[in-house]
């Protein structure tokens, strides 16, 4: 049983078809149940083809035994075999005794005995000693290969004789007939140099209450590592947890084509886990200046930095809950600064369905040092092109903000920093459509979706000339195309998120339901022809927003911090329809609004970032509900523990008055398109009372015909001659069932 929302159909535009992507999976639902490395080898493309983009889809789920209730760091790393060999000096002992290294050993080649007093027979007795296994390493050319094995018997001790009372009356010394004194043979352990590069870092969510079916996907652009993602490659998933656990699925998607510029070199500047005491100590022993050689032919470069802070058992809760700034310097000149802080954890897309009441279990909404539970660590990229010279050396340095802390636990940071060097740009004027943020069903953007207005996309300047303008065309399946002209100033390889206003296609967006596809394309960078079109088009799957009644009551109860709460209702063009803020504590508000047909966004915010309820506070509980103003029935209840902000897009449409079941038969309407008179063939509908209704694109009823069919063989005419050209919905109803179909009235 369902209600029918008036829907309008349009022609779908076709986009160019380019080479399909290829996906390589290194980890397929691999359990990470305990601290350590989970390594897998994968067969990547052979390098005979170039790729414009490589995306790592990192899907985290619950391990077989369930998800861990704590936030642990996971890192996805590329273990690159360089082909270069290195060695370390080792010392091989000349012998071992029972597997251990002794300074010396003394023994007999024959059996030795140990005497003891036999209390039963009141006499002296003896027992044979066990052997010692002596492994001899005597070949200086092959120092780790044993040359002899000796079974020796213990010596250099006293044996005693006893009288009948157990008193010692004599002794004799058991001396050795052989001795070894330790020596060492030098040798070199030769190995291939393995360089480790971090591709992704995600902190696990508080998963104690997550279902076993939980899965969440983060996407990472790893195109910079294309030269290393070739042939057989070892990929490491590192899990820092000490309890079961999470799973990792790693899918590398390769998009054939030409990158904006070829990567010449990727070199590590800093990498590891480092304790922090003072800024001076940190910069002397951890983030010290590094001399980096810029390869010949390099035209641009960036510093790629990921840093997360951990530990908080001290007076300032550093480093996890302490916002610190770091500074990038090139040849001693400060070129960039970055606040190492995640300031929107309260909008985390993984937030709890319910609380346990256990302290620290659900502190998901607290902002942290560049991470949130369940979220990726942000990778910050700094353009250092103006400060480099090809075939020369530059000193790269990162300084950390100084701060003082005290307490039992010191702050620490996990840092991964690289210098990425690029050759000459392949294009001058080119714009890339990087990602569709909304509408989409992607996990990462769950807080921003679904929508019915203001789609959002990310674009990137793919050409060497600064991007100052481009055109963005977009539509949904079955709908007309909308165009937006973007202007700004975007340097080479920089990205920006663009919000797209909907104008003349609003009517179609507002009357769709169910599953849909969103199409977007970019063109005309800087007003000229795009030099490379393979990166211009994207699609996304999404689920349409719900349809609510037009007259609603916003029923809002504040908690004990009413002044923190606010809400507002916006229409599809971004205008505020109703809003309320500055509310009193523990107070119920009931605001009635009457909404015409269209798209709306209801938004709740909390300036304390802890919603209307948070178990770890004493501010009480509030609620927010939407009621049907006509019936008083609650049809929407929002979660009280929403964190900083919650948005809910919905539509107000024209629903048929009764819940109906779809007819198995279909009606035939002709001519379609037609000039105004349409024939509706009722073949197969049977006998009984019937109703034909016609709605325009605004959802308004324009024709309503009631009649009785004797045998379901009639042809009924519908006259739209006096109505404007355009699309209409013809609905045929019979015995509580229906069928609907689109028609186009056109005089041409």
Image (cartoon, grey):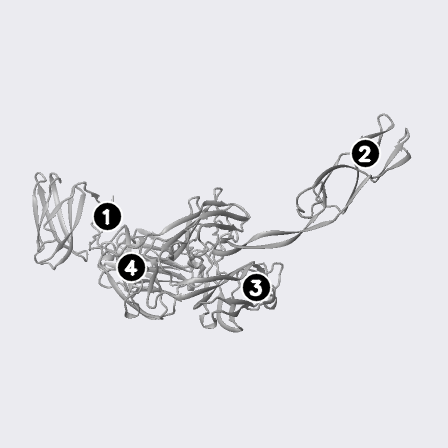
Q: Nearer the viewer, mark 2 or mark 4?
A: 2
Q: Within 10 angstroms of label 3, few (less than 14), some, or many (20 or more) residues?
A: some
The residue that mark 4 highlights is 520
Residue furthest out toward the bottom: 333
Question: How far is disc 1 from disc 2 in space, using C-alphas?
Answer: 98 Å
Q: Residue 603, position in %: x, y?
A: 35, 60
Earlier sequence position, callout 4 versus callout 3 = 3
Give me the C-alpha separation between circle 4 and circle 3: 47 Å
Q: Residue 552 at what x, y percent from top left?
A: 28, 57
The residue that disc 1 covers is 3
**Residue 137 appears left or right of 383:** right
Please indicate whether residue 54 sits to the left or right of residue 415 in the image: left
Q: Residue at x 79, y 39 (%)?
A: 107
Q: Which residue is mark 2?
A: 112
Q: Of residues 74 and 157, which is closer to you in this image?
A: 157
Q: Residues within 10 Å of mark 4 (few under 14, many from 20)?
A: many
**Front label number (1 vs 4):** 4
Q: State the CA–CA distance, disc 2 to disc 4.
A: 89 Å
């Amino acid at each position: 049983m369902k209600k029918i929302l008036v829907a309008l159909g349009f022609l779908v535009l076709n986009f160019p078809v380019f080479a399909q992507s290829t996906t390589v999976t290194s980890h397929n639902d691999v359990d990470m149940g305990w601290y350590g490395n989970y390594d897998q080898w994968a067969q990547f493309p052979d390098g005979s083809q170039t790729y414009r983009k490589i995306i790592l889809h990192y899907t985290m789920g619950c391990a077989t035994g369930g998800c861990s209730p704590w936030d642990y760091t996971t890192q996805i790393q590329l273990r690159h075999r360089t082909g270069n060999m290195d060695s370390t000096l080792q010392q091989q002992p000349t012998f071992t005794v029972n597997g251990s290294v002794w300074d010396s050993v003394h023994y007999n080649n024959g059996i030795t005995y140990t005497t003891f007093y036999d209390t039963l027979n009141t006499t002296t007795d003896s027992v044979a000693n066990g052997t010692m296994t002596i492994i001899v390493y005597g070949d200086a050319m092959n120092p780790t290969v044993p040359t002899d094995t000796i079974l020796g018997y213990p010596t250099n001790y006293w044996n005693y004789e006893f009288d009948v009372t157990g008193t010692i009356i004599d002794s004799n010394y058991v001396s050795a007939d052989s001795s070894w004194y330790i020596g060492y043979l030098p040798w070199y352990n030769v190995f291939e140099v393995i360089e480790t590069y971090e591709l992704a870092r995600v902190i696990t969510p508080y998963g104690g209450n997550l279902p076993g079916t939980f899965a969440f996907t983060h996407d990472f652009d790893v195109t910079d590592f294309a030269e290393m993602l070739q042939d057989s490659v070892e990929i490491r998933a590192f899990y820092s947890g000490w309890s079961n656990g999470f799973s990792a699925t790693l899918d590398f998607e390769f998009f054939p084509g030409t990158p904006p510029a070829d990567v010449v070199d990727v070199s590590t500047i800093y990498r590891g886990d480092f304790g922090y005491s003072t800024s001076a100590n940190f910069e002397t022993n951890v983030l010290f200046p590094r001399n980096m050689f810029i390869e010949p032919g390099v035209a641009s470069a960036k510093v790629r930095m990921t840093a997360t802070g951990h530990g908080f058992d001290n007076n300032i809760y550093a480093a996890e809950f302490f916002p610190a700034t770091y500074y990038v310097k090139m040849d001693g000149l400060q070129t960039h600064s970055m606040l190492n802080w995640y300031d929107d954890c309260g909008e985390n897309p993984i937030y709890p369905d319910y609380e346990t009441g256990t302290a620290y279990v659900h502190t998901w909404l607290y902002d942290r040092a560049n991470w949130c539970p369940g979220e990726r660590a942000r990778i910050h990229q700094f353009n250092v092109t103006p400060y480099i010279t090809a075939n020369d050396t530059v000193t790269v340095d990162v300084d950390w903000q100084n701060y003082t802390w005290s307490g039992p636990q010191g702050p620490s940071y996990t840092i991964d920093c690289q210098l990425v060097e690029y050759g000459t740009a392949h294009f001058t004027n080119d714009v890339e459509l990087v990602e569709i943020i909304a509408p989409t069903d992607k996990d990462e953007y769950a807080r921003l979706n679904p929508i019915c207005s203001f789609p959002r996309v990310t674009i990137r300047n793919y050409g060497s000339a600064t991007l100052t303008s481009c055109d963005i065309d977009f539509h949904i399946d079955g709908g007309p195309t909308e165009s937006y002209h973007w202007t700004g100033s975007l340097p080479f390889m920089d990205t920006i998120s663009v919000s797209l206003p909907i104008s003349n296609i609003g009517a179609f967006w507002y009357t769709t339901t169910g599953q849909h596809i969103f199409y977007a394309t970019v063109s005309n960078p800087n007003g000229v022809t795009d030099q490379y079109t393979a990166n211009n088009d994207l699609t996304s799957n999404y689920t349409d927003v719900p349809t609510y009644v037009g007259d609603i009551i916003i029923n809002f109860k504040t908690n004990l911090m009413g002044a923190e709460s606010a809400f507002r209702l916006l229409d599809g063009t971004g205008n505020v329809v109703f809003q309320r803020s500055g509310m009193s504590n523990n107070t119920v508000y009931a605001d009635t609004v009457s909404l015409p047909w269209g798209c709306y966004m209801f938004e709740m915010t909390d300036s304390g970032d802890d919603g209307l309820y948070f178990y770890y506070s004493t501010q009480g509980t509030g609620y927010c509900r939407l009621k049907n103003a006509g019936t008083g029935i609650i049809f929407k209840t929002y979660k009280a523990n929403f964190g900083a902000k919650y948005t809910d897009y919905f539509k107000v449409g024209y629903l048929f008055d009764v819940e109906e079941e779809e007819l198995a038969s279909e009606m035939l309407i002709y001519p379609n398109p037609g000039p105004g008179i349409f024939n509706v063939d009722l073949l197969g509908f049977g006998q009984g009372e019937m109703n034909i209704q016609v709605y325009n694109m605004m959802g308004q009823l324009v024709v309503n015909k009631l009649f009785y069919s004797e045998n379901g063989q009639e042809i009924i005419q519908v006259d739209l001659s006096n109505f404007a050209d355009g699309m209409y919905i013809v609905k045929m109803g019979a015995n509580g069932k229906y069928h609907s179909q689109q028609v186009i009235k056109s005089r041409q």
